Image (cartoon, helix red, strand yellow):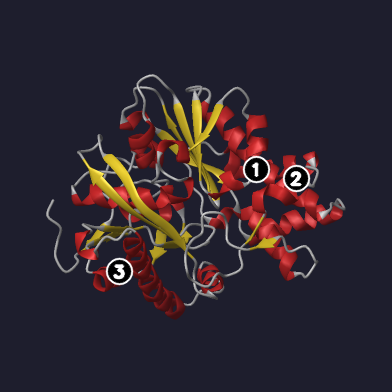
Amino acid sequence: MSGTSIDGIDAALVDITGKSPHLKIRLLAWDIFSFPKGYKERILAASHPSKAGVDEICRLNFELGELFAEAVRKVAKKARVSLSRIAVAGSHGQTICHLGGKGTLQIAEPSVIAEKTGITTVADFRPRDIAAGGFGAPLAPYLHYLLFRDLKKNRAVQNIGGIGNLTMIPKKARPDDVMGFDTGPGNMVIDGLLKEFAERRSGFAGQSERPRGYGGTGVADPHYYDHGGQIAAKGMVHLGLLKELLSHPFISRKPPKTSGREEFERPFVLKILSRARSLKLRKEDIIATATALTASSIALNYRKFVFPKMIPDEIVFGGGGIHNATLMRMIRAELPNIKISSFDLYGVPADAAEAVCFAVLAHETLHGNPTNIPTVTGARRAAVLGKIVPGRKMPNL
């Protein structure tokens, strides 16, 4: 898969045994492969209605299919596993438009993946949930339920990618006890601000390098991010601006709710810059305030929508945001007295979790098991997700 931040293609090779919901999930290998130069800009352009042309979207769909197939080959080679031994490839693809319950579009043509690898491929997971009346997201709560349900502990799972999303798993939970939704911006506002600073040649470009966990061999596009939260740590949070930003209607909206880039992309970033300029804020203060926006929006959603139902004994964090020490410090300050841990403590590296998720979803699709959770997505019923593209031979189940 490739997420909202468009950092690269996440690929994981997973050994799955047992029957749902008692699957045993063992990660054999994983990696993150950078997009060739120029692809991030093309994907971003294809995500904007005013810039996207149907011919370019068509080309990108097939070109990304080639890149995803190459990621499959590389991660299999890393694990020294023959492609012929792989039962199924699960591909989320690259989201270029997500309109909640009104529609969604992920590209990276699965027919290309199946043809180039010979592996039966399951892709396009969101549309069936939307057809069943849901928002098509989030889908990761199914994996979270499998990994973190517990007889004695209330757990929550918080992912911080481009967008933040949470999963609530009460003790002794059945699937219909699980709740999950997007909380608001994750890393994308911070990244967007740093990109604007760089493009305006302000002399404050932030880091332009690959985040921790990258091991791919592609040519990296510049990805502007606050490495370790070092920039935010030098700034002061402007409480007035933070209060204004937290008034964004999505943040306090009652779940089920899901967000793509559309809610918090460049127009939102430019509004922050305009307001910050009028307040005469330093660039470090702007990044600190944007970081506080992510932390505070996460905490606000817990206070409004989770704590009235359960108090988590533990919140398990995943996604690239966990590498931002300043962000995590702010979250701990907002959510005191709750144990904070990470996916890594449970055998799945935080950076690999989303790729593992789509391996599991593909496995479940082949076995005819529903993987949307209606209490999460708002769908009328649980449904088997995804479209199956046969490989050179169908797997023996």
Q: Is residue 246 left or right of residue 5?
A: right
The answer to whether mark 2 and mark 1 are in CB contact below 8 A is yes
- Say if residue 247 shows up in the picture: no
Q: CA distance from mark 2 to mark 1?
A: 9 Å
Location of mark 1 (residue): 325
Nearer to us in this view, 77 or 237:
77
Which of the two residues, 190 or 325, is positioned nearer the viewer here?
A: 325
- CA gap, disc 3 to disc 1? 37 Å
Residue type (three-letter) at the residue carrying disc 2: Ala
Alpha carbons under labels 2 and 3: distance apart: 43 Å
Dot in front, 3 or 1: 1
Quarter of the rendering occupied by the N terminus: bottom left
In the rendered structure, which amino acid carries the disc numbered 1?
Ala
Q: Residues within 10 Å of mark 1 (few under 14, many from 20)?
A: some
- 2 to 116, vertically: above or below: above
Q: Earlier in the sequence, mark 2 or mark 3?
A: 3
The residue wearing badge 2 is: 233
Residue 95 location, x and y as percent?
A: 45, 61
Q: Dot 3 corresponds to which residue?
A: 113
